[in-house]
Image (cartoon, rainbow, N blue to C red):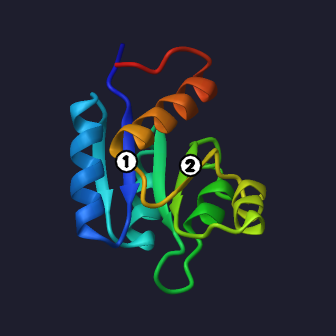
């Protein structure tokens, strides 16, 4: 099976390092971005198999909304990492099109499991590489 591509978007260098390393070790081709605008441009240029993004993001950019309302990226699954714990926050993200929602802090293994679940459900088969 071909290696799955993944775009990890967070402004925090430690999250990019920890999660990126774990996802690479699990066989994903991981690209990272700190800036939502940079991430959106990268996703449009070459849509990944999945996007992981931090909510909320700095500034007023809503990467989830932009990805889900663009014809080139609308079908790309998005997993949200967040500290927003209220049920209405989760509902808003799901209504906005997110495919997975994880509360921080989360272990790399939990993120890998969620990414595999989202990719498998989107592609209709086991997502292991």
Q: Residue 9, percent across and down?
A: 39, 61
Q: Which mark is residue 53?
A: none
Q: Quadrant of residue 32?
A: bottom left
Going from the N terminus, do you reach mark 1 or mark 2 first? 2
Q: Residue 98, percent across and down?
A: 65, 51
Residue at 59%, 72% (x, y): give it.
62
- Of the 4 image quadrants, the one containing the N terminus is top left
Q: In which quarter of the image is residue 63?
A: bottom right
Q: Which of 119 and 68 is in front in this view?
A: 119
Identity of the residue furthest to the bottom in this view:
59
Q: Residue 78 carries which label?
A: 2
Q: What element carries label 1?
A: loop
Residue at 38%, 42% (x, y): give it.
6
Q: Nearer the viewer, residue 41 or 39?
A: 39
Residue at 64%, 44% (x, y): give it.
99
Residue at 40%, 19% (x, y): give it.
128
Q: Residue 68, percent across and down?
A: 66, 55
Q: Residues within 10 Å of mark 2 (few under 14, many from 20)?
A: many
Q: Is residue 61 above or below residue 105?
A: below
Q: What element carries label 2?
A: strand
Q: Is residue 71 left or right of residue 25?
A: right
- Calculate the distance from the C-alpha at mark 1 to the C-alpha at mark 2: 18 Å
Q: Is residue 32 left or right of residue 7?
A: left
Q: Residues within 10 Å of mark 1 (few under 14, many from 20)?
A: few
Q: In this view, does 32 lie to the left or right of 66?
A: left
Mark whose residue sits in front, 1 or 2: 1
The residue under label 1 is: 107
- Of the 4 image quadrants, the one containing the C terminus is top left
């Amino acid at each position: 099976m071909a290696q799955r591509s993944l775009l990890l978007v967070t402004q925090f260098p430690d999250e990019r390092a920890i999660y990126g390393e774990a996802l690479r070790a699990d066989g994903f081709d991981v690209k990272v971005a700190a800036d939502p605008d940079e991430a959106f441009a990268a996703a449009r240029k070459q849509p990944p198999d999945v996007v992981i993004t931090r909510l909320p993001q700095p500034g007023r950019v809503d990467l989830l909304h932009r990805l889900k309302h663009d014809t080139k990226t609308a079908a790309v699954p998005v997993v949200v990492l967040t500290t927003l714990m209220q049920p209405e926050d989760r509902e808003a993200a799901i209504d906005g099109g997110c495919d997975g929602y994880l509360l921080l802090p989360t272990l790399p293994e939990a993120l890998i499991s969620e990414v595999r679940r989202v990719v498998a459900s989107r592609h209709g088969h086991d997502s292991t590489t």
